[in-house]
Every structure is written in C-alpha cells, then in structure tokens.
Image (cartoon, rainbow, N blue to C red):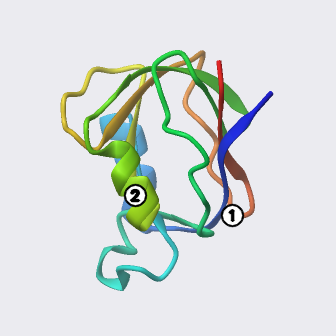
Amino acid sequence: MEIKYDVSITAIGNLARTFLENNNSAILLDEGIRPNLSDMVIEHTPGKLEEDIKKGDKLLMGGVKYTVEKVGDAANDNIRDEGHCTIVFNATGSMPGQIIVKGPAQPTLSVGAHITFTKK
C-alpha cells in the first residue's frame, strides 16, 4: 500500500457533521488556515500530497475504505495548497474541488482519526 496523502483530523466543525448527513460530503481543510470556515469543515494536520489522487485510488476515512471514482480538476492543487477538497460519499458531484468516492457506508468522524489516500 503506497500512501499518497495522510493527515489526522484535529477538529470537526458543528456544520461538518450536518453536511455529511444531509449532503453526503465532507469539506477538508488544513487546521487554522481559514478560521472563518472552521464551523463547516473538518480540519486536519498539514500533509504532503506525494502524488496526485486518481480514479481507482483508495481512501481510508473513519474506519471505512472507499474507492475514488472521480477527481475534480482543481482537487489535487487545492490539497497541495491548503489541504482542501470536498469528498463526496456515494453520490454524484461535478465541482472542480470535489473527490467522488464509493464505499459501503458513511465514515465515522472523530478527532485523531486519519484520512489516508493510497494507490490502487
């Protein structure tokens, strides 16, 4: 398993859980980079994107393994710049900063949990 990106959740905004439940999505952002957005995002430790995330790669988040179905045109650059992307779980999306994933269930979010993308 070759790791492309690995970070730990440091804070979960009050609206972040609502977005996950109602919109099947989670907005990720490096901790402290945009305090005005902290209520709606999942903040995490800064990490280095070792290689672009691509269709077919795997995501392990909240104890659940997902397969990457689609990567928006801006997602990898946004992750490099600010640790930012929106992960959409088992739904469709078309925004340039989104990563669409498929898996058996929604992730269980908790501070300290890892968000890890690996090669296929």
Identify the element where label 1 is drawn: loop
Please tell me which residue is depicted at 21% across the width and 39% down the height of the picture: 96
Q: Amino acid at mark 2?
A: His
The relative height of residue 116 versus residue 118 in the rendered view (above or below) is below
The relative height of residue 29 versus residue 24 in the rendered view (above or below) is below
Residue 87 in which image quadrant: top left
Which residue reaches farthest front? 51
Q: Which residue, given by chain and number where applicable, does mark 2 sit on? A: 84
Q: Judge whether residue 28 can be spotted in this image.
A: no
- Crowd band around label 1 with a 10 angstrom C-alpha radius: few (<14), some (14–19), many (20+): some
The relative height of residue 103 versus residue 16 in the rendered view (above or below) is above
Image position, residue 41 (x, y; %): 41, 62
The circle on residue 88 is none
Q: Amino acid at mark 1?
A: Val
Identify the element where label 2 is drawn: loop
Residue nearer the viewer, 86 or 21: 86
Q: Quadrant of the N terminus?
A: top right
Residue 20 in which image quadrant: top left
Please tell me which residue is depicted at 24% across the width and 27% down the height of the picture: 93
Q: Which residue, given by chain and number where applicable, does mark 1 sit on? A: 111
Image position, residue 109 (x, y; %): 62, 50
- Crowd band around label 2 with a 10 angstrom C-alpha radius: few (<14), some (14–19), many (20+): many
Q: Judge whether residue 116 can be spotted in this image.
A: yes
Which residue reaches farthest right? 1
Horizontal side of residue 1 vs 8, given as left or right? right
